[in-house]
Image (cartoon, grey):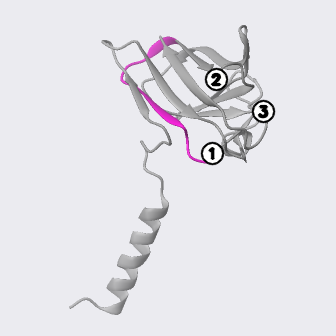
Amino acid sequence: MASRLQWSVWLVSLAILGALPALSQSNFGNLTLSAGKLSGTLTGSTGGSTSLPAIVSNRDRNNNRCLGFGDPMPDHVLVLQQNVPSLKLRVNSGGGDTTLVVQGTRDVRCGDDSKRGKDASLTDTDWQAGTYKIWVGTATPGERRDYTLYVRQ
């Protein structure tokens, strides 16, 4: 028969584990890129009111400002099964003012307006194999926009 202490430890452990987000948990889905799969598409919608810089940092590894508002939980999780020399992420929300925040285990990368308009894009080099959390945000808190996120090596 378990003692009160054992039950207490078990209940506290269960509460802690329940409070931790799963590594691969996301709002709208995950994407894995490998040697055989060099690109992919994800869909979702914006609408959160949490400051994305407050989640990750005000500036990314290239000193770009991190901007936007989104949900506290990442919208997507990207898994790179191998190192990638260059990666491009592009949002299409039909012209909304969107932002991108990508958080890996070692660094953060942020993107804002693209050459095509106010939808965010991000192109960067030296992506290490691993798991990356992706937030698609908006310039205005709570603004709801459906989007497609294109990811391409």
Can you tell which quarter of the image residue 139 is in? top right
Q: Nearer the viewer, residue 70 or 24?
A: 70
Residue tagged 3: 139
Secondary element under disc 2, as helix, strand or loop, is: loop
Q: Position of residue 91 (x, y in %)?
A: 61, 20
Q: Nearer the viewer, mark 1 or mark 2?
A: 2
- Region in magenta: 72-86
Please give the name of the residue rendered at 54% of the width and 38% of the height, measured from the top-left corner: 75
Secondary element under disc 3, as helix, strand or loop, is: loop
Residue tagged 2: 93
Q: Nearer the viewer, residue 124 or 140?
A: 140
Residue tagged 1: 71
Q: Is residue 131 left or right of residue 90?
A: left
- Type of the residue with mark 3: Ala
Q: Residue furthest top?
A: 115
Q: Position of residue 108 (x, y in %)?
A: 63, 31
Is 51 contained in the magenta span? no
Q: Position of residue 82 (x, y in %)?
A: 38, 19
Measured in 3D between alpha carbons, the distance from the residue under mark 3 to the one under mark 1, in whole angstroms, is 13 Å
